[in-house]
Amino acid sequence: MFLQPLMSLLADGEVHSGQALGEALSLSRGGIWKQIEGLRALGVDVQALPGRGYRIEGGVRLLDRSLIIAGLDPAVSRLAPSPDVHFSIDSTNAEAARKAVQGEQSWLVLAEHQAQGRGRRGRQWISPFGRNIYMSLLWPFHTGVAALEGLSLVCALVVVKALHRMDCHGFKVKWPNDILYQQRKLAGILLEISGDVSGPCRVVIGIGVNACMPAGAGAAIDQPYSDLTAATDKVIDRNQLAAALINELVAALTEFERHGFAPFREQWMQLDAYAGQPVEIRAGNHSRVGIAAGVDMSGCLLLDTEGGREVISGGEMLPSLRPLPDPQGAD
């Protein structure tokens, strides 16, 4: 079912009668109703007003490829692939990976909706239509997989910097790659790497940012979350935000390939949401508890435990709900 023409008509937030929509799209009223139901299945809140028609209260400003391109810095425009904007897709990361298989060296894809959005560790990424940012960038590296330590942390910093460009502040980062607002998840990163350990490789960098999460969709999220509407009390232009993300991401990737994570470490330490706090690190069936002490020059977590400082390269960080051992051995 091709829903984009109907969505374009309803995006203005005005009331449109079923007859007018049918005439504009050469559909019967029954056909319009089926398409309305199709939009609702994507997470679009289409209101039916008896005797009047249909509307999306407040409207939706759709992603616009030309506006995103217009917002790119000149230096970034020369390096970034032209954005490929989809109405609905299974997953932007999956699409970028398909382009890699087809031989593309770089690709940039955004979508209004993801049917199978993915987060880290196989989790679902809730992706209602037209409210958030779902973006993936396929990017080549010539230094090999082994040189990509810390890249996920850099991408989290990218999101915070892009939000600063939008005059949005108050965000923190959580190792290895979440962005938080008041300890609630606002955005996340998913990296998928293919290629040689020491030779050329390609990375798909997926970025999801909650701009204005509808309450109905948010109810399906299995952890505390926030969005930019709650954090800033204003409506964020998603085209401007997409451009800001691309600008910061391309600039950071260029810097990272030359110098690695080290130049970004101090920025991370300043934004670390859990520095000095008790945390639990889970990796598979194993877990460790200690005090988060920031990250090292490669982006590994530094964890102060009863046995001393440990360097941790992978796992999931959670606030510790267990008491830490007394370092003095007191009762």
Image (cartoon, rainbow, N blue to C red):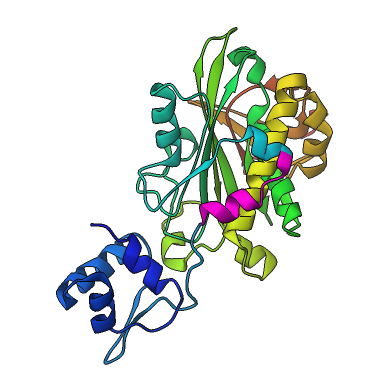
Task: Indicate whether 65 appears above or below 122.
Answer: below
Point out the image quarter for the N terminus. Answer: bottom left
Residue 87: x and y, percent? 39, 53
Q: Residue furthest top?
A: 198
Is 152 positioned to the left or the right of 283 in the image? right
Residue 250 is drawn in which quadrant?
top right
Whether residue 263 is visible here, answered yes or no, is yes
Task: Pick the residue in front: 144 or 146.
Answer: 144
Q: Residue at x 57, y 22 (%)?
A: 140
Residue 320: x and y, percent? 64, 41
Q: Residue at x 43, y 21 (%)?
A: 103
Q: Is residue 147 magenta?
A: no
The prevailing secondary structure element of the residues shown in magenta is helix
Point out the image quarter for the C terminus. Answer: top right
Task: Pick the residue in front: 284 or 179.
Answer: 179
Is 136 positioned to the left or the right of 1 in the image? right
Whether residue 290 is visible here, answered yes or no, is no
Q: Residue at x 45, y 33 (%)?
A: 96
Is 70 positioned to the left or the right of 167 in the image? left
Q: Residue at x 75, y 53 (%)?
A: 165
Residue 328: x and y, percent? 83, 29
Q: Tell me where the magenta segment starts and ends, as one range.
A: 64-74
